[in-house]
Image (cartoon, rainbow, N blue to C red):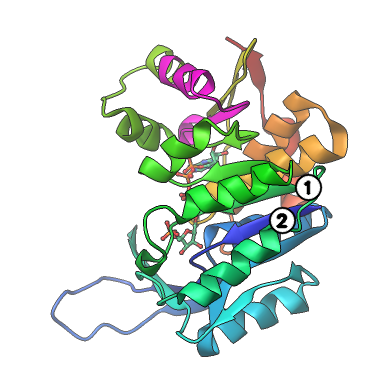
Amino acid sequence: MIYTVTLNPSIDYIVEVEDLKLGDLNRMKRDLKLPGGKGINVSRVLNQLEVGNTALGFLGGFTGRFIDDKLREDGIGRDFVFVKDDTRINIKLKAGEETEINGLGPVIESQEAAKLLDKLSHLQPDDIVILSGSAPPSLGGDFYQKLVQACRQSGAEFVIDTTGKALKEALVHKPLLVKPNHHELAELYGVTINSIEEIVLYGRKLLAEGARHVLISMAGEGALLITENEVYRATVPSGTVRNSVGAGDSMIAGFVGTLVLTGDLIEAFRTGVASGSATAFSDDLAVKEEIERLRPQVDITPL
Ligand SMILES: Nc1ncnc2c1ncn2[C@@H]1O[C@H](COP(=O)(O)OP(=O)(O)OP(=O)(O)O)[C@@H](O)[C@H]1O
Ligand SMILES: O=P(O)(O)OC[C@@]1(O)O[C@H](CO)[C@@H](O)[C@@H]1O
């Protein structure tokens, strides 16, 4: 079974205004409320690809119920810990360019945090757990470490998509996949990156530190897949970008879902890129038909 873990889900409140005037009254041209948070996005795209999965994490209040209802309507498995405080609302403001304002997230009490760790103590060795996104500050700085240890103690594989110290510390536990974008990669190593050769160099450092597969996404510039023996570059299909929120999560879903279904690394990479682009070209996350349409447009070459 694939599990996703979203420590800090959100309602993504997508707001479009014609011409934003700061300090003035602006009227919305369009708005949309979506269940969000990185692991939840992965669950939604896995579901599109007909890959069964269960979404875990913390939900609370009316915002949490909204997310739970939406996932239930889509037939996605859920096993959330319900907390007292409200799940956050993240604002995605479209006014020509995209501006994001993400909430800190709810207070998670220690007994609520313990309930999630308890769920992970029942994992099986053939499970894959996808850990994605920020952690609410109240969980403390080492909660990801605890999650990773819980996965490893049960023998389950894990994928981690977060930043900074939590990502660095997870590497030694040999994640199946990490997927920083090229900016996050540079930030992780405290460097500026100016070329594909440098991206490969630092991507290989992630492997040396323990990651088993490294995907580096570069938005409209394509993506790299780096494994112990191979480096591949993918082009992205062309299309009109409508929304980049969740493109990276969709890529993880496409890659992991296809790897589980077929065991074929190149096809997993292709579906990952097509899924990211299908989201970038949609208002909401990628749907199956669009992923299928874009897949043949992704060219993959060894470097
Ligand atoms: N402008 C674009 N054109 C085509 N495909 C895109 C574009 N932007 C993103 N994608 C697709 O989505 C994938 C992931 O995008 P990106 O590198 O922006 O990830 P990310 O920074 O993790 O995204 P986010 O944090 O917004 O979810 C890319 O590898 C590509 O397949
Ligand atoms: O604040 P975090 O956890 O880093 O990111 C949360 C978030 O921006 O990521 C998703 C897109 O990747 C959105 O659905 C959500 O609002």
Disc 2, SS? strand
Q: Is residue 34 visible?
A: no
Circle count: 2
Amino acid carrying mark 2 in the image: Tyr
Q: Nearer the viewer, residue 73 or 157?
A: 157
Q: Quadrant of residue 273?
A: top right
Q: What is the quadrant of residue 185 in the picture?
A: top left
- What's under tag 1, amino acid-wise? Asp
Q: Position of residue 19 (x, y in %)?
A: 26, 70
Q: Position of residue 303 (x, y in %)?
A: 57, 9
Q: Which residues are magenta?
A: 201-222
On screen, residue 208 above or below 155: above
Identify which residue, 186 or 34, lies in the foreground: 186
Residue 29 at x, y percent in the picture? 40, 79
Q: Please tell me whether residue 256 belongs to the stretch shown in magenta.
A: no
Tell me: residue 15, above or below residue 302. below
Of residues 299 and 162, the one drawn nearer to the viewer in this rendering: 162
Direction bottom: furthest residue: 62
| Dot 2 or dot 1, earlier in sequence | 2
Mark 1 C-beta to ligand 2 under 8 Å: no
Q: List the residue tagged with mark 2.
A: 3
What residue is drawn where x is 45% and y is 77%? 109
| Side (left or right) of 142 relative to 212 | left
Q: Is residue 79 left or right of residue 37?
A: right
- Residue 268's spot in the image, x, y percent? 74, 33
Judge whether residue 115 can be spotted in this image: yes
Label 1 SS: loop
Q: Residue at x 56, y 72 (%)?
A: 58
Identify the residue position indicated by label 1 in the image. 127
Q: Is residue 81 left or right of residue 180?
A: right
Q: CA distance from mark 2 to mark 1?
A: 7 Å
Labelled pair 2, 1 in contact (Cβ < 8 Å): yes
